Image: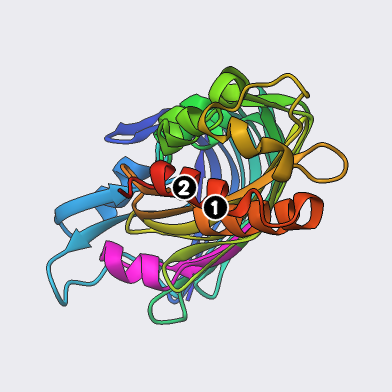
Amino acid sequence: GDATNISWIEGKVTGPGLDLTPRLDIVLGDDFTTVVGRVEAGTLDLDELQSRLAPAPETAVANWFVGVARAAAGTPMWSPPPELAAEVQLSAREVLTTGHRIERVSANVSLAGQKLDVREIRAALGSGRISGEATVDYTEDPPRWTTDLDAVEIPASVLLAPDAPKLASALNTTLSGQIDFAGRVTPRPEDAMKMLSGQLKLGAGAGSLLTEPVIGDQISKFVGQYAPAWRELAFSALDAELRVQDGQVLFDRFLLSGETQVRVGGMVSLEGRCDYRLDLVCRLLPATNVGSLQPVVEFLRDDDGTFPFAVRVTGPARKPKVQIDFDALQNRAEKRGRDEIEDAVEDAVKGLWDKLKGKN
């Protein structure tokens, strides 16, 4: 049959989550609809739009890589009709999504066969920049989405704030690297988290980390006069490779380099529990007082004068349990003590460790 051509050349579309000025050519056929043109947006609130397109939520959660809403069981989410095709240039003053305000956004959006492609994404996040592409495949059940983004000098306080507010306020640096994720479009947050996978490769130059808001003050008490340097830990570089799978963020590599080196291995679950290990190497000055360790500090130093020790962090990420590996330190001190002055220090070291660990 004949097709109908419509040109949308003026007017706005406004509503919850929307403030759009479309300039579109629309062709309506018996079994197809095509849309070509340009859309300019003042504010585009994707979280609000999702809540409107999804069934009425019972609860909602959002984090920086996926926002989902719990819906009544068996109620389908919106998906584009198979006969709809589109090719649109999108620009927006700001896009609100998963707790972030992304500004000066531009992208090319295409839809064909219920597959959505968002290409040539360019945007500002804080004082940094993001670029890349994203897809949603509505032919799969549930629909599958992917993101492939490059981040350049994004402030950690901006990038991490929605998901890790304590770390975001404590980490002072800018992050650059790759952020790649895949998941499923689902109204149930627990299902979305289970099906989420991805990888982050991020790096940073010089910066600082306020350690006590993140893991408490136990290490500060442990290192005596070195505590001020630990509380506000300066670093010259950050190198991180994180992997997301099975509802967990896995630390494949996380290294802070500087006068104190910190290496992290383990995991933090998306449900808020943690189990990871910190391996620290402090470059203590000869005169540095390390509190209760002072009597045996010389037996704990490496040949280059550094002081290595390990810390285990477990439990709820909001208030984790922090345990210094005293057994490894005791073994190290006793071994080095025996090597240097035979067995004379062994009993003294054991007595000191019993006091440090609260034994009688």
Residue 206, horizontal then vertical, whole percent: 76, 26
Residue 339, horizontal then vertical, whole percent: 79, 57
Q: Which residue is mark 1?
A: 347
Could you tell me which residue is drawn at 65 percent across and 34 percent down?
123
Q: Residue furthest right?
A: 304
* Residue type at the position of mark 1: Asp
Could you tell me which residue is drawn at 29 percent across and 62 percent down?
189
Residue 109, horizontal then vertical, whole percent: 61, 52
For mark 1, give the secondary structure: helix
Could you tell me which residue is drawn at 80 percent across and 50 percent down?
340
Label 1 near label 2: C-beta < 8 Å?
A: yes
Quadrant position of residue 232: top right
| Residue 228 visible in this rendered orientation of the protein | yes
What numbered label is drawn on residue 45? none
* Residue type at the position of mark 2: Gly
For mark 2, give the secondary structure: helix
Q: Is residue 126 above or below residue 317?
A: above
Quadrant position of residue 38: top right
User: The magenta stretch spans which residues?
Assistant: 178-198
Q: Residues within 10 Å of mark 2 (few under 14, many from 20)?
A: few
- Tell me: 190 left or right of 313: left
Q: Residues within 10 Å of mark 1 (few under 14, many from 20)?
A: few
Q: Is residue 19 above or below residue 275?
A: above
92 in the magenta segment: no
- How far separated are the C-alphas under marks 2 and 1? 6 Å
- Tell me: 14 left or right of 288: left
Q: Which residue is mark 2?
A: 351
- Tell me: 208 left or right of 272: right
Could you tell me which residue is drawn at 17 percent across and 72 percent down?
75
Q: How many marks?
A: 2
Closest to the observer, 251 or 227: 227
